[in-house]
Each structure stands twice: as C-alpha cells, then as structure tokens.
C-alpha cells in the first residue's frame, strides 16, 4: 500500500498541474476575439498591436517588451490592463511566478476578464504550494453568476477547488467538489479532463486508505486513457494499474501494465526525436545557405583578382600574361568544383523533394483515414454498435501503427543521412535479438490470422550494431505482415552459415514480386523505390533504410521471390569469430 500511495500522490501533482493550467489564448475564445477588436479600435497604438500579436503567437519575450512600452506610453486604462495581463501570462509561461503575480495584481477590478486574473493567481498559488490562498481565488471565480459570458469551463473551477481541499486534507469537501466536477465532465463528454477527475478521486480515497473505492476509479481512468492522444496520461494510467495489480499480488497482469507503461514512455521519446529531426533539418538548411554564400564570396574574390590583374597588366605586360593564365586555370578549376557540387546538390534535392512528397502524401492519407474512421467511430458509439466499433478500433490501430513506423523510419533515415546516428558494432546473439523484435509483432500477426514460426540458430553470433539490427529486422517483419494475405504464414530462420557470414531469412507467403521489381529493390541508390500496389501504404523508405544499415554493418541483402507465392528476404551479416 505504501508504494501505490506514494505513486498516487505524484500522479495527483501531475494531473493537478495539467488541469489548473489553461492556454492563455485559445483560437476563437471570447478573450481572443476581444483582443483583436481592441487592436482594430486602437490601431494607432502600435506597441499594443505588436504586443497582442506576439501574445497570441506565444512569443513571450517580445510580448513582455512591447506590452511594457505600451504601459509606459499609454493613458488608456483598459489597454494598460490588457498589457498587464499579457505580461502576467508571459512571466507565468517563463516560470517567473513572483513577477507574474505582481503583474496580475496591477490589473483593475473593472477589467472585463477579471475572473481570468483570479484564475491565474490561483494557478500561481498552487505552483507555489499556497493552497489556502489558491482556494480563495478559485472560490471567487466560482461566485461569478452569469457563466454564459465566460470562456472557461465550470468543471475546471470545481475541480481546482476540489484539488485544493485535497491538498489541505479536507477530504469531505474535496470529495464533494471532485464529484461535481466529474459529473459535469461526464455530461460534456470531456474525456481528457474526466480522466484527471477519476485519478484525483482515486487519490482522494487512497489518502484515506479506502482501496476498494479508489481502485475502480483508477480502472475507469485507465480505460478512458485509451481514447486520448496524451502519452503522459496513458503512462500515468498504465503505471497506476501496474502498482494496483502488484498490491493485489497479480504479478502477471502487473507485468502487462508495466510493459504498456514502457511502451508509452518510448512513444513519448520518439515524439521528442521527431521534433529533434525538425530542428536538425533547420540547421542543415542554414548550413546549405551558408555554403551558397561562401561560393558566391569565392566567385567575387576571383573577379576582383582578375580585375586587379588587368590593371597591373597595363603596366607590366609579362605579369599580365602570367596572371591571366593563372586566374583562368583557377576559374576552370572552381567552375568544375561548383558544377560537381551543383550536380550533387541537385541529386540530393531531388531525393529530398521526392521523400517529402511521398511521406507527406502517406501521412496525409493516414491522418485522413483516421479522421474518417473516427467519424464512423463516434457515430457507432452513439448507436452502441459494438461489433462495428471493434472493427473500427482495430482499423485505427493499424493506421496509427503504419504512421508510427513511417515516422520512425524517417527519423532513422535522417540520422543516418546526417551522420548523427550512434553506431557501435559488437558481438550479438542473433536469436536473442530476433526474439526481442518478434515479441512486439506476434499480436499483430495473431490479429491478421497469420501463422508465425521462428527457428533461429542459437549458436549464431554476429558482429553488428544492436539498434540498427533491430531496425532492419523490424522493418522486414513489418513488410512481411503488410504484404501477407489473411491465413498466410511468416517464418524467420537461419540458413547454414559460412566461415565469414551468418544468414537470417524472413519468409512470407504473401504477394511476392517479379524479377524486375526484385532487381530494382537491390539497386544501390538513395532514391526511393516505388510501390506498384496503391492499396498498401508505404514509401519504400524502410527498404532503403534497411539496405543502408546492412551495408554499414558490413553485410548485404539478397531477395528470393515469386509473384503470388511469397518472398524470402535474406539478411547476410558478418559473423563474430572470437566468441568463446
């Protein structure tokens, strides 16, 4: 009980922060509309116009600068109140809570959105663990009578009051407000906030050691977390259930939840890697522009040198001739270098443009498919058509997995192309690596009614980088599943190895390919392969990534295939000879 109580408290703090914090300017909100109207009304106040634009764009440093200029120069009390509000939000987002509190306290009581000021002061008090003060602010917001004119959710105010009472150990009032909040969220079908309410109710009962009342709310929160896209919420819900089942001594089920927790943790890390790629691409573009500037600078230097040579040549004819020949040769050499660089750059740009075009198309197709499926999902949810719901949920899962694999391959491809990927070759037990990868694919094959067999030699050790080897096997298995028919079969096994290499075969009974397609796939090119079957979502990026990684590990790829019979992907990797 001690373990789950400590973890539940940490989740309480996380969920509390999530629910207390609200975006300062939602598109279409009452405040956002009012700010735009004020900007048009006082269009001569340039500093206010810039301050509100930076505020709505979440550019906090510029918001602080221009709102301070407006405060210093303006005599309009209403605009000054807005600028103090902008500064309060800016400091709050930059975690300068005391400065934020000072700005909010400078706002007059006549400010139209004074209830938002009280809400923000309450959030700051929570961040500073001044729960009694926070409670006073939230209770003031609760007293506003005509809520129809306010762009905030009543359930959020009720929930915040309940959380303050919970921190203050006033369990009866905390329970009353949290129940009120959850009931409103159930009516409004606000799933994300409802998950937080269920978790906080569970924590409320755990604080009082009422396990039988707490656990059902943890379970409700877990089931609802399946319907949201927040990885943090999914992680918290899964780990709560893991600890609950550990306390029940149901260790097999607890292990399942623990694995799910790690899965969402990895998903969050992958999401961060995608943003890292975007930043890397931005830096790469800057470097390319700098190279162009350097080339132009070199050309200008050549022209200046030629001009000076002709001036000197008017005096010294012999020097003119020698200098002319020298610069002529330099110019030819530079032109050859520039032409070679241009051809290389054109080829890289063509590859990049093709990649972006295909990836964008496939991502748009996946998102559009999810959008359409979610519409059907909501319609069948209202009609309680559970059979169709099950089909749609499996469809959404398949689409999401495809999009995830595409982004994962894009990340690894970008890291490989920019030489940023970590690469370390070592002795690896091939059967163990295959077992790690196939574990995640067995449920997918089971759902697709695909028979699976694994017979990898226990004596094979390869000399390779572990992460890249997992990527290769994962992509090969993913393709085998993608191109296999229902009730088909997939096998992964070892062929007899030679003195130098180990042979790993991934065989499927799927669509197969003709000899032309097989030869195209084996070409050493950076360009993407084209898919003949438009019904199968893919870019060919995974295959290009696999070929690049196999070559980097000192191996090679062979393909045996026959149309409508199946395909054998043969991965050949160097053997680790010194294994004792």
Image (cartoon, rainbow, N blue to C red):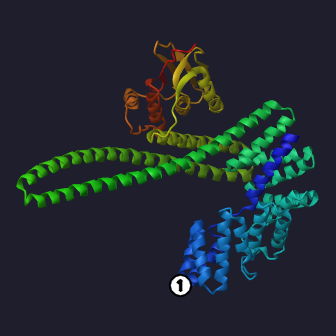
Name the residue rendered at 16%, 46% in the picture.
329
Q: Residue furthest front?
A: 316
Comparing 270 with 319, the one in front is 319
Q: Residue furthest left?
A: 317
Q: Position of residue 299 (x, y in %)?
A: 25, 55
Q: Secondary structure at mark 1?
A: loop
Name the residue rendered at 84%, 42% in the picture.
4
Based on the displayed image, in which of its 4 quarters is residue 270 positioned?
top right
**Residue 534 can be seen, yes or no:** no
Residue 184 lies, with reference to residue 510, above or below; the image says below
Q: Position of residue 53 (x, y in %)?
A: 56, 72
Residue 208 lies, with reference to residue 49, above or below; the image says above
Instruction: Name the side, left or right, on which 533 lies relative to 324.
Output: right
Comparing 99 with 149, the one in front is 99
Q: Position of residue 134 (x, y in %)?
A: 82, 66
Comparing 436 with 92, the one in front is 92
**Residue 163 can be seen, yes or no:** yes
Name the residue rendered at 64%, 53% in the picture.
375
Q: Position of residue 569 (x, y in %)?
A: 48, 25
Q: Which residue is mark 1?
A: 44
């Amino acid at each position: 009980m001690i373990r789950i109580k400590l973890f539940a408290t940490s989740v309480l703090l996380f969920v509390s922060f999530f629910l207390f914090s609200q975006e300062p300017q939602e598109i279409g909100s009452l405040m956002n509309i009012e700010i735009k109207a004020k900007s048009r009304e006082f269009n001569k106040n340039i500093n206010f116009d810039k301050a509100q634009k930076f505020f709505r764009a979440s550019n906090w440093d510029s918001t602080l600068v221009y709102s301070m200029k407006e405060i210093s120069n303006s005599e309009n009390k209403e605009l000054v109140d807005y600028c103090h509000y902008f500064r309060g939000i800016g400091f709050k987002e930059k975690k300068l809570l005391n400065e934020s509190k000072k700005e909010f306290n400078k706002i007059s009581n006549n400010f139209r959105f004074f209830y938002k000021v009280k809400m923000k002061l309450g959030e700051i008090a929570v961040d500073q663990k001044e729960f009694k003060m926070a409670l006073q602010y939230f209770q003031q917001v609760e007293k506003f009578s005509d809520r129809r004119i306010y762009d905030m959710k009543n359930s959020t105010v009720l929930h915040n009051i309940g959380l303050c009472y919970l921190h203050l150990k006033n369990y009866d009032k905390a329970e009353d407000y949290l129940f009120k909040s959850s009931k409103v969220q159930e009516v409004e079908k606000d799933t994300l906030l409802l998950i937080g309410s269920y978790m906080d109710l569970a924590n409320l009962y755990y604080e009082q050691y009422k396990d039988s009342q707490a656990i059902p709310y943890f379970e409700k929160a877990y089931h609802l977390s399946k319907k949201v896209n927040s990885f943090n919420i999914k992680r918290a819900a899964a780990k709560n259930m893991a600890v609950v089942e550990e306390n029940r001594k149901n260790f097999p089920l607890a292990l399942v939840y623990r694995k799910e927790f790690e899965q969402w943790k990895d998903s969050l890390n992958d999401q961060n890697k995608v943003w890292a790629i975007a930043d890397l691409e931005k830096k790469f573009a800057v470097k390319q522009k700098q190279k162009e500037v350097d080339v132009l600078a070199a050309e200008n230097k050549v022209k200046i040198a030629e001009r000076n040579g002709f001036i000197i040549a008017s005096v010294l004819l012999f020097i003119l001739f020698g200098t002319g020949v020298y610069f002529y040769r330099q110019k030819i050499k530079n032109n050859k270098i520039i032409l070679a660089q241009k051809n290389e750059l054109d080829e890289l740009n063509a590859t990049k443009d093709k990649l972006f075009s295909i990836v964008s198309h496939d991502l748009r197709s996946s998102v559009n498919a999810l959008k359409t499926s979610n519409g059907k999902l909501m319609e069948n949810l209202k009609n309680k058509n559970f059979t169709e719901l099950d089909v749609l949920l499996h469809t959404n899962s398949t689409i999401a997995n495809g999009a995830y694999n595409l982004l994962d391959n894009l990340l690894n491809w970008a890291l490989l192309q920019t030489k940023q990927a970590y690469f370390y070759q070592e002795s690896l037990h091939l059967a163990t690596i295959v077992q790690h990868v196939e574990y995640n694919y067995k449920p997918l094959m089971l759902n697709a009614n695909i028979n699976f067999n694994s017979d990898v030699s226990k004596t094979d050790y390869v000399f390779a980088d572990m992460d890249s080897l997992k990527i290769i096997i994962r992509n090969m298995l993913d393709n085998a599943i993608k191109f296999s028919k229902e009730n088909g079969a997939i096998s992964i096994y070892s062929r007899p190895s030679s003195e130098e290499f180990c042979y790993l075969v991934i065989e499927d009974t799927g669509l197969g390919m003709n000899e032309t397609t097989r030869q195209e796939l084996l070409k050493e090119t950076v360009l993407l392969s084209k898919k003949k079957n438009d019904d199968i979502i893919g870019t060919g990026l995974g295959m290009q990534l696999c070929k690049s990684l196999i070559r980097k590990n000192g191996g090679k790829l062979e393909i045996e295939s026959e149309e409508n019979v199946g395909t054998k992907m043969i991965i050949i990797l160097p053997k680790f000879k010194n294994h004792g």
